[in-house]
Amino acid sequence: MAARIVRNNTSQVIAALRQLAIARIDSGAEVIEAVSRQIVPVDTGALKGSMERTGEGTATQTVRYGDSHKGGEVDYALLVEADQPFLRPAAEQGAEAIRRRD
């Protein structure tokens, strides 16, 4: 007996999977934001204050430090990260949060 498609709900399945993926990305970005804020090295507070998260609720999210458009020059964010990593460990924890999320 041949299988017969009674109703094609492919678009609903794809939409549900996309929503699930975005929810996991949101969770991971939240972890990255929280962890990096806790461990970012602080001298004057300019670097910590420059944290920006964009793209919330989308599949493309960014957590960044050091954007000069926020009112101050913190171009040294890359140098700090190279010497005292804070974003990479946060990203690793964020990735783990995405993998283990139910």
Image (tube, rainbow, N blue to C red):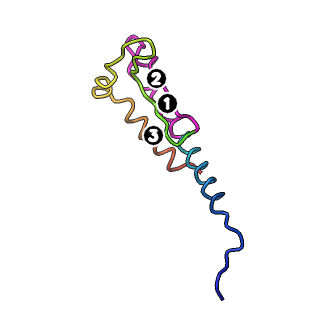
Comparing marks 2 and 3, which lies closer to the viewer? Answer: 2
Q: Is residue 7 left or right of residue 53?
A: right
Circle 2/circle 3 CB separation < 8 Å: no
Seen at 67% across and 63% down, the residue is 9
Seen at 51% across and 46% down, the residue is 98
Per the rendered image, the range of residues in magenta is 28-57
**Residue farthest to the bottom?**
1
The residue that disc 2 covers is 51
Comparing marks 1 and 3, which lies closer to the viewer? Answer: 1
Q: Earlier in the sequence, mark 1 or mark 3?
A: 1
Q: Is residue 6 left or right of residue 62?
A: right
The residue that disc 1 covers is 33
> To which quarter of the image does residue 13 belong?
bottom right
Residues 27 and 60: in front is 60
CA distance separating discs 2 and 3: 17 Å
Comparing marks 2 and 1, which lies closer to the viewer? Answer: 2
In terms of secondary structure, where does tag 2 sit? Answer: loop
Residue 49, position as x, y percentages in the image: 46, 17
The residue that disc 3 covers is 93
Seen at 46% across and 23% down, the residue is 51
Whether 43 is among the magenta residues is: yes
